[in-house]
Amino acid sequence: MVDDLKGALSFSVGDTHNGSRRGTVKLNRGSFSTPIFMPVGTRGTIKAAIANDIAAIGFEVILGNTYHLMLRPGVEVIDALGGLGRFSGWKRSMLTDSGGFQVMSLGATFSDAGATFRSIYDGSIHDVTPEKAVWLQEMIGADIAMVLDVCTNLPASRDEIKRAMDLTHSWALRARFAKHRQDQAQFGIVQGGSEVDLRSESAKFISDVGFEGIALGGLAVGESRDDMLRAIDAVVPHLPPDKPRYLMGVGDPIGVVEAIARGIDMFDCVAPSRVARHGVAMTFSGKMHMRNQKYVRDESPIEPGCPCVACANFPRALIRHLVSVGEPTGGSLLTLHNLTFMYRLIEGSRNAISTKTLGEYIKSIYAAWGN
């Protein structure tokens, strides 16, 4: 519809296997390989970790959240300091979420014009329109910007889901025409809840707008994994094969590898760092609750063979002690471990696509993480 508004992104597909694919996304500032998991730095940095630590793991893209950054420190501050990358010390690519999910989760009101919500910091009232969301992200300066969408918690009525989808479509067109920065790619967002016919309709509409990439929003918001996978199955056939596909907010290992098998390229989730702060380690044998008494004298690393800084230097006994007494270093070490696990999970998926063994790889993740 508006193909003249090109952004600085190209996508090429390499190895494929039964619908899954490896690829390369090239941006104005560098490139990254897919499939990819992107750690979430809600307020400009990943909680309990610094940019150098995340880069050392191997991550190529992290997220910032427009909702939080617009409130504090403010986009004018970030712009004055050279954009979010320089502000946060992250030297690789960045993506910013428009804040649609946060607005939804905080009980915002929606109209054709946009969304109205209260700040979680001081209770002040704010309005965000599709055009303002574009402007905010252009000020923030990420390499990839998401359009403002309407997300609904599931389960929800079909009427509610369709209303959210229709608004998302209207807003997507407005956001596309509001785009000015040619060095910033813009992704549209497919909605439709768990209604497969609405998902198909939304995928066709968003694909026709001409965005540089397509995201699947409104999933992992209360529906079952089977419903999520059915929604993905309904969407993928209608997406352009030459553009990256991004499943927003999904980070459970089974969900990730199942989505990769269906041709999804990009993922993000706060879960790896969030569960780390609650003393949970993610491993290829499943979850480990590090406060467990059995680790009091355990000299083993969290996961033998893991290259993370925690496993390379510290025993389970120390990690258990730190998280048990509330020492923040414990959460920090577990965050780096869990993010290393996610990086290795994705790396294993890429290799399995190339060797045509993704089915066996998925079975191993199910064996470790249950049904």
Image (cartoon, helix red, strand yellow):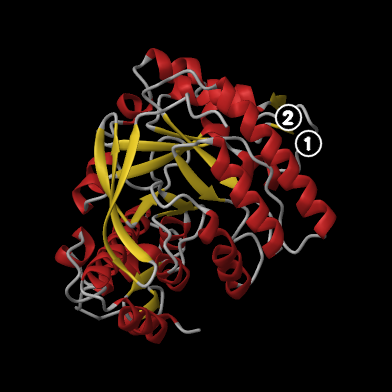
Amino acid type of disc 1? Phe
In x, y percent, where is residue 306? 20, 69
In x, y percent, where is residue 26? 28, 39
Q: Are the residues at dot 2 and dot 1 in contact (C-beta closer than 8 Å)?
A: yes
**Visible in this render: residue 12?**
yes
Callout 2: 10 Å neighbours few (<14), some, many (20+)?
Answer: some
- The single residue placed furthest to the top in the displayed view is 80
Under circle 2, the secondary element is: loop
Callout 1: 10 Å neighbours few (<14), some, many (20+)?
Answer: some
In the displayed structure, 37 sits above or below 296; it is above
In x, y percent, where is residue 307? 17, 64
Report the quarter where the N terminus lies.
top right
Numbered label attached to residue 5? none
The answer to which image quadrant residue 150 occupies is top right
Residue at horizontal 25%, vertical 40%? 31
Count every numbered label the image shows and give the total: 2
Residue at horizontal 40%, vertical 48%? 244
Numbered label attached to residue 114? 2
Name the residue carrying label 1: 110
The answer to which image quadrant residue 51 occupies is top left
Q: For this rendering, which residue is in front, 308 or 172? A: 172
In x, y percent, where is residue 106? 70, 43
Q: For this rendering, which residue is in front, 204 or 75? A: 204
Residue at horizontal 33%, vertical 29%? 85
In the displayed structure, 106 sits above or below 267; it is above
